[in-house]
Image: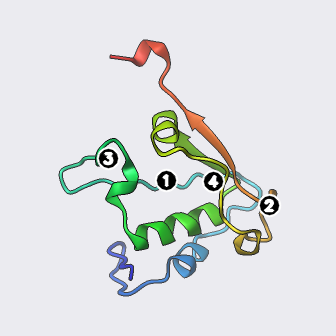
Amino acid sequence: MMRQLLPCLRDPVDPATLYDDLPPIGTRPAVRLNMIASIDGGTAVAGRSGGLGGTADQALFTVLRSRADVVLVAAGTVRAEHYGPSKVPRSRRRSSLRSPKPRQSSARRPPAWRT
């Protein structure tokens, strides 16, 4: 079960229906951000973000990936969680998207940012 808190309370809410409600942007690219954190702001348990989520989080990630042309994942997450190609079935992809599966891209900090 998933609950929407803002801008108005909806309980329960289907993430597929919720994200189909977003306003169209025509041919312009759009960015959607989703992340998970613990109550104290932590982003990992034992070095992995997957330990923070449950079935509702996985359902939401699947919906978001089914609507994306590119999924950007931090390089550390890719290494720690052994990310591979998207597992979103072709049948769940929106027909308006350009690729049958979302491409995956990873980002890392430039050496000057390292502490």
Identified by mark 3, the residue type is Ala
**Which amino acid, by three-letter code, is at mark 1?**
Leu
Between the residue at mark 2 and the residue at mark 1, the CA separation in whole angstroms equals 21 Å
**Residue at mark 1:** 33
Residues at circles 2 and 4 in contact by the CB criterion of under 8 Å: no
Give the number of the disc on residue 30: 4
Which residue is located at x 80 percent, y 61 percent?
100
- Please say if 58 is above or below 27: below
Which residue is located at x 41 percent, y 53 percent? 35
- According to the picture, the residue beneath numbered tag 2 turns out to be 100
Element type at mark 3: loop
Question: SS for tag 2?
Answer: loop
The tag earlier along the polypeptide, 3 or 4, is 4
Give the CA separation, mark 2 to mark 4.
18 Å
Q: Where is 110 relative to 79, above or below?
A: above
N-term-proximal mark, 2 vs 1: 1
Q: Left or right of 63: which side holds 41?
A: left
Looking at the rendered structure, the kind of residue marked 4 is: Ala
Q: Which label's residue is closer to the chain start, 2 or 4? A: 4
| Residue at which label 3 appears | 44
